[in-house]
Amino acid sequence: MIEEYIESAKEELKRVDHLVYVSLKYARTCDVLKSVVIRLIDAIDFLFDALAQKAKDENKIIDLPTTPALKADTLKKAYADDELIQEMITFYLFLRRVNRAEFTRKNEYRRHVTMTVILEDVIGIKIETVTDYYNKAREYVKHIEELLEND
């Protein structure tokens, strides 16, 4: 079951890879940037499911939470000693806020397409930004895989 979650996360990252390196090359729109954010959220969701299952198997948690916020909170407590997992949870919550926020479009169909999101600060999400997000998510998948293999 845990392996299926990891594989699903990897499949989502393959889709993100295509969006970042192919779709954005030809369709430089905020819709594609938003799709990258949504796919990254989905990939991390699968990682959360894998971590929650592992924590349940090790009796660190009693029930598998269903809502994303509860899942994040539960995992934050269960894996308090793992700095990268804590970072991943913070990143995940950030992406969810970005996804829900209103945004403005700038320079669509051009090299410097920007999706501007207003949270506490104004955040300009560009092709380079989502590429960094993608690389960060790949790092998380690798870390979770190593963590689960060591058991």
Image (tube, rainbow, N blue to C red):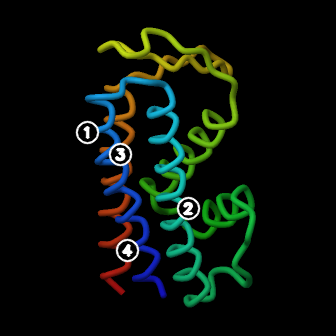
Which amino acid, by three-letter code, is at mark 2? Asp
Q: Secondary structure at mark 1?
A: helix
Q: For mark 4, what is the residue?
A: 7
Relative image position of residue 21 (x, y in whole percent): 24, 39
Q: Is residue 111 left or right of residue 1?
A: left
Which amino acid, by three-letter code, is at mark 3? Lys
| Residue mark closest to the camera, 3 vs 1 | 1
Q: For mark 3, what is the residue?
A: 136
Q: Secondary structure at mark 4?
A: helix
Relative image position of residue 131 (x, y in whole percent): 32, 35
Dot 4 and dot 1 residues touching (CB under 8 Å): no
Question: Is 49 rendered above or below residue 38?
Answer: below
Mark 4 vs mark 2, CA separation in Å: 12 Å
Which amino acid, by three-letter code, is at mark 4? Glu
Q: For mark 2, what is the residue?
A: 45
Which amino acid, by three-letter code, is at mark 1? Val
Looking at the image, tell me whether mark 3 or mark 4 is earlier in sequence order: 4
Looking at the image, tell me whether mark 2 or mark 3 is earlier in sequence order: 2
Looking at the image, tell me whether mark 2 or mark 1 is earlier in sequence order: 1
Q: Alpha-carbon neighbours of circle 3 within 10 Å: few (<14), some, or many (≥20)?
A: some
In this view, the residue in front, 144 or 79, is 144
Q: Is residue 36 left or right of residue 73?
A: left
Question: Which labelled disc corresponds to residue 83?
Answer: none
Q: For mark 1, what is the residue?
A: 22
Q: Secondary structure at mark 2?
A: helix
Q: Is residue 54 left or right of residue 137?
A: right
Mark 2 vs mark 3, CA separation in Å: 15 Å
Relative image position of residue 124 (x, y in whole percent): 49, 17
